[in-house]
Image (cartoon, rainbow, N blue to C red):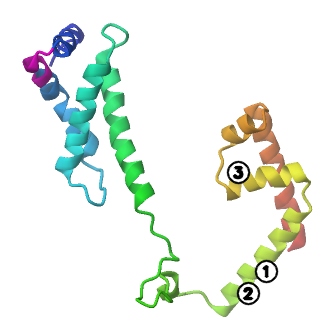
Amino acid sequence: MLSYKEIENLVGDSKKGNKLSTMELVKHFEPFIFNAVKNVNISGYDTNDLIQVGYSALIVAINKYNVNSNTFCSYAYRAIKNAINYTIRSNVKHNNLSLNNTIDEEKTMTIIDNIQDESTLEDTYLTKLTNNQLSKVLSNLNYEDKELIKEIYFNKTSVRKYAEKHQIYYQKALRRKNRILMELRDKFQGEG
C-alpha cells in the first residue's frame, strides 16, 4: 500500500513523463477500478470495456491534477466514478426504449399493445374513479400550488430545484409542498 506522499511523488513523476510511475499508479488504483465496475451492466460493454474507462479516467486525472492542491486519491476516485457514471448515463440516453416503439414491419403494433393486462373491469373502473376524483381535487388548487405539484410530481423536479427556480428558500418550498399534500389528502378523502 502506497502512502500519501508516495502517491503524490508518483503523480509528479508521471506528469513529467515517467511511464514506470504511471504504471505504479495504475497498479495501485486497479482494485478500486475493478470494484467500481463489477456490478455495472451496460448494453454493448463488457467488464473489460468498463475497466478501460476507469484506466482512461485515471490517466486523465493524472494529467489534470494540480500537485499538492488536494489529495490525488480523492481526486482520482471521483474522476473514475464520474467517468463510469457518465458512460452509464450516455448509454441510457442513446438506448431509450419506449413502450410506443413499433415491433412489426407495418409499424402498426407497439410494445404496449402486447403487454398482458391483468386488471379486471372493476380495477379499471376504480382507477378511473380515483383519477377523476384526483383531477377534481387538483383543479381546486390555486395556480402556484398546481404549479408546484405539477413540477415536483409530474415533471419529477426535486424540491431543491423547484426552490432555486422560483427563488424561494428550500424549507419554504418543502413546507408548501407538505401543506398542499395534506390539503389534497383531506379533500380527496372528503370526495370518497
Q: Where is residue 185 in the image (x, y as percent from the top left)?
A: 82, 60
Q: Position of residue 158 (x, y in %)?
A: 65, 44
As shown in the figure, which amino acid type bears the numbered disc 2?
A: Tyr
Pointer 1 and pointer 2: residues touching (CB < 8 Å)? yes
Q: Is the magenta stretch mostly helix, strand or loop?
A: helix
Which quarter shows the N terminus? top left
Q: Callout 3: helix, strand or loop?
A: helix
> Any mark on residue 125, and which?
2
Q: How crowded is mark 3: few (under 14 residues within 10 Å), some or many (20 or more)?
A: some
**Residue drawn at 71 percent across, 79 percent down:** 127
Q: How crowded is mark 1: few (under 14 residues within 10 Å), some or many (20 or more)?
A: few
Pointer 2 and pointer 3: residues touching (CB < 8 Å)? no
Q: Which of labels 2 and 3 is toward the front?
A: 3
Q: Earlier in the sequence, mark 2 or mark 3?
A: 2
Residue 55 horizontal side relative to residue 190, left or right: left
Residue 77 horizontal side relative to residue 119, left or right: left
Q: Which of marks 1 and 3 is nearer the N terminus?
A: 1
Q: Distance between the residues labelled 1 and 3?
A: 23 Å
Q: How far apart are marks 1 and 2 (CA)?
A: 6 Å
**Residue drawn at 12 percent across, 17 percent down:** 21
**Residue drawn at 26 percent across, 21 percent down:** 63
> Any mark on residue 152, and which?
3
> Any mark on residue 7, and which?
none
Which stretch appears magenta? Answer: 17-23
As shown in the figure, which amino acid type bears the numbered disc 3?
A: Ile
Looking at the image, residue 126 lies above or below residue 19: below
Pointer 1 and pointer 3: residues touching (CB < 8 Å)? no
| Quadrant of residue 191 within the rendered picture | bottom right
Residue wearing tag 1: 129
Q: How far apart are marks 2 and 3 (CA)?
A: 27 Å
